[in-house]
Amino acid sequence: MIAAQYQALNSHFHLKDIMKQPTDSKCRMCCKAEEHVTHNAAGCTVLAISKYTNRYNKVAGYIHRTICKHMGLQVTDKYHERIPHSFMNVSSSSIMWHVPAITDGTILANRPDIVLHYK
């Protein structure tokens, strides 16, 4: 963890600038930006398509499961294997997962992860 904080992980950027080895410091995945800790954690366009989205959806799925559990619904213990239903009605409320939101104005990104609607 400390190596990551000091950006001393074994990346191409670290090998070239810190260790002074003759190597290309570009990212191994996208070959566009310098491969350092910040780029690997949140900036690589190739990883963003799959790894970041998968990680983000797992966290949102855990939050969805917690909301369902709080509302009194039966949920499984294996939250990482659970695929949320797109629409669930619970007594006086509804829980929506990745459902486009209907708005008055045009919004390009109108598909929120979780919508909790109290009736």
Image: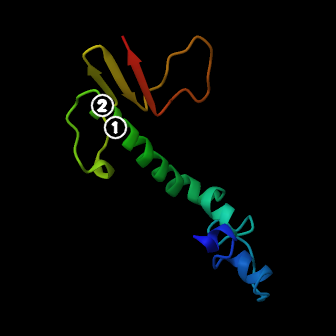
Label at residue 70: 2
| Front-most of residues 45 and 73 | 73
Q: Which residue is located at x 28 percent, y 26 percent?
A: 71
| Front-most of residues 66 and 114 | 66
User: Which image quarter: residue 83?
Assistant: top left
Quarter of the picture containing the C terminus is top left
**Residue at the farthest front position:** 2
Count of numbered circles on the image: 2
Quarter of the picture containing the N terminus is bottom right
Label at residue 92: none
Q: Which residue is located at x 66 percent, y 56 percent?
A: 43
Q: Position of residue 11 (x, y in %)?
A: 66, 76
Residue 26, placed above or below residue 44? below
Mark pair 1, 2: CA separation: 6 Å
SS state under label 1: helix
Residue 18, placed above or below residue 99? below
Residue 47, placed above or below residue 84? below
Q: Are the two marked residues, 1 and 2, in contact with CB atoms closer than 8 angstroms?
A: yes
Residue 14 located left or right of residue 42 = right
**Residue at the farthest left position:** 74
Label at residue 66: 1
Kind of residue indicated by mark 2: His
Q: Position of residue 72 (x, y in %)?
A: 23, 28
Kind of residue indicated by mark 1: Thr
**Residue at the farthest bottom position:** 21
User: Which image quarter: residue 96?
Assistant: top left
Q: Residues within 10 Å of mark 2 (few under 14, many from 20)?
A: few
SS state under label 2: helix
Residue 20 located left or right of residue 93 = right
Q: Position of residue 57 (x, y in %)?
A: 44, 45
